[in-house]
Image (cartoon, rainbow, N blue to C red):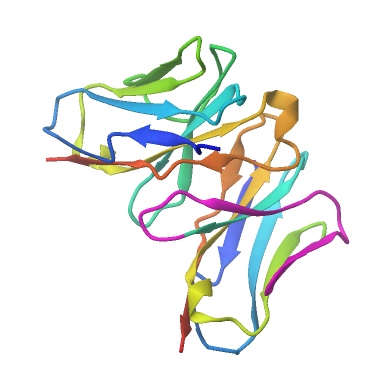
Amino acid sequence: EDQVTQSPEALRLQEGESSSLNCSYTVSGLRGLFWYRQDPGKGPEFLFTLYSAGEEKEKERLKATLTKKESFLHITAPKPEDSATYLCALRTGANNLFFGTGTRLTVIP
Amino acid sequence: EAGVTQSPTHLIKTRGQQATLRCSPISGHTSVYWYQQALGLGLQFLLWYDEGEERNRGNFPPRFSGRQFPNYSSELNVNALELEDSALYLCASSLSYEGTSGYGYTFGSGTRLTVV
């Protein structure tokens, strides 16, 4: 059975304090691992897609990495505007995305 | 370019009633996906439509149904509403099946359904 687990559930950081969010997964046939950002009351916003172990993608203060069992979203020197829920999702053979429950990030000025 | 649009933004219904939620995909996108996001839970996959046909369905009872129109817009219907159906319902669109590979989905802002 495909599973995706995100940790921690919630994370509070001081502005400038770097950290990482984790997405662990088990899947029979991975066709992509996706990271999204979701602000309260809004739909998720696409950040990255990763396909194979060792792949890395970067966007501003965010960097996503992928191994055979997990993905990390590294946040370098975060700012208050980075506060959001970050969602990890797997795309399997059925095409639809299977989401984790997310990490709620709060960055304190 | 207009994004994925959903209507209404908010909907309040009484238990036992029916709710209809609407979604217009990005121009050129033929696949539409529906997700339920209940408070404290992750996004739960409901339905996937492509080229007017239902391609996949999540683990939800038959009272959750929908359709996709020739212009690729979509409608989600929830019959015999229950209190636990209260949630944010998100619609997403993408290019056809093989076109999703790079960019995932584009989501709308959702319809907040409250059942009282």
Q: Is residue B16 left or right of residue B107?
A: left
Q: Is residue B26 left or right of residue B111?
A: right
Q: Could you say where residue B53 lies in the image, as x and y percent from the top left?
A: 55, 12
Q: Count up the numbered dots.
A: 0
Q: Residue at x 67, y 31 (%)?
A: A95
Above or below, B115 against A61 in this view is above
Above or below, B21 against A104 in this view is above
Q: Residue furthest front?
A: B1
User: A100 and B22: which one is in front?
Assistant: B22
Above or below, A26 against B89 in this view is below
Q: Residue at x 68, y 40 (%)?
A: A91
Q: Could you say where residue A97 lies in the image, as x and y percent from the top left?
A: 61, 40
Query: Is A12 contained in the magenta span?
Result: no
Q: Residue at x 52, y 60 (%)?
A: A102
Q: Could you say where residue B22 lies in the image, as x and y percent from the top left?
A: 36, 26
Query: Is A61 contained in the magenta span?
Result: yes
Q: Quadrant of the N terminus of chain B?
A: top right
Which residue range is magenta in the image?
A: A39-66
Above or below, B78 against B100 in this view is above
Q: Could you say where residue A20 lies in the image, as x and y percent from the top left?
A: 66, 76
Q: To which quarter of the image does residue A7 belong?
A: bottom right
User: A105 and B58: which one is in front?
Assistant: A105
User: B73 and A90: which one is in front?
Assistant: B73
Q: Quadrant of the C terminus of chain B?
A: top left
Q: To which quarter of the image does residue A54 belong?
A: bottom right
